[in-house]
Amino acid sequence: MTTTWVLVADEAIARILQWRPAERALDPVEELTDPIAHARDRDLRRDAYGRRNSTVTSSAGEDETRLAAERFAREVCDHLTQARQQGRFDVLRVVAAPRFLGLLRQAMDTHVDDAISDELNKQLVYLPPHELADRLFPQPAGGA
């Protein structure tokens, strides 16, 4: 039996779900988070207003945010590599916010990359599992 995982991610959260075809359902497996990502974004936006008249440009904040996103992408990919080596999944579907999908592609191990069946560059990380299942595994025409 093939085990299919779905990774749904953005720069702050990565949800891993497992597809159960008989029930047409996605079950949560685990969730990785970068809890300071949203706080950092808020702080950087607020900080940018104070920096406009200083010598520090707003791109310094953008660089910091990008580095944090790259670090989180590597963390997610390392986690997937370990899971793949342990035989926890056979097939991986990746759904990620467009910018984060690019970072995941750069950080992905070839062993995991070989398991990827498809990618979707959409921000769907906050959809509930039943809505994700409907979008990613649509009912064939004519029912069951």
Image (cartoon, grey):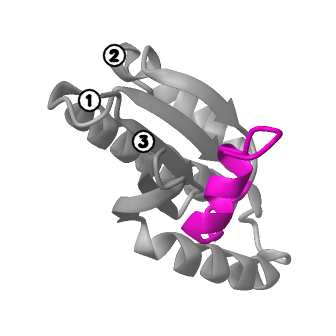
66 falls in the magenta region: no
> Is mark 2 in CB contact (under 8 Å) with mark 1?
yes
* Mark 3: secondary structure: strand
Tell me the kind of residue under disc 2: His
Tell me the kind of residue under disc 1: Arg
Residue 102, how many percent across, how many down? 65, 33
Residue 116, how many percent across, how many down? 50, 24
Q: Nearer the viewer, mark 3 or mark 2?
A: 3
Tell me the kind of residue under disc 3: Trp
* Mark 1: secondary structure: helix
Q: Which of the pair 63/124 is nearer the observer?
A: 124
Q: Does the magenta stretch mainly form a helix, a strand or a loop?
A: loop
Q: Which of the pair 73/90 is nearer the observer?
A: 90
Residue pictured at 42% horizontal, 47% vertical = 71
Residue 28, how many percent across, how many down? 39, 63
* Mark 2: secondary structure: helix
Residue at mark 3 to residue at mark 2: CA–CA distance: 15 Å
Instruction: Say which residue label 2 marks.
Output: 111
Q: Nearer the viewer, mark 1 or mark 3?
A: 3
Magenta part of the chain: 123-144
Q: Place residue 44 in its image quadrant.
A: bottom right
Between disc 3 and disc 2, whose residue precedes?
3
Quadrant of the rendering where the N terminus is positioned: top left
Q: How would you rate the neighbour count of disc 3 (Cα within 10 Å): few for under 14, some for 14-19, many for 20 or more?
A: many
Looking at the image, residue 53 lies above or below residue 100? below
Residue pictured at 56% horizontal, 27% vertical = 105
Give the numbered dot on residue 5. Answer: 3
Give the numbered dot on residue 84. Answer: 1
Looking at the image, residue 50 lies above or below residue 52? below
Quadrant of the rendering where the C terminus is positioned: top right
Is residue 60 in view from this perspective? no
Residue 111, how many percent across, how many down? 33, 16
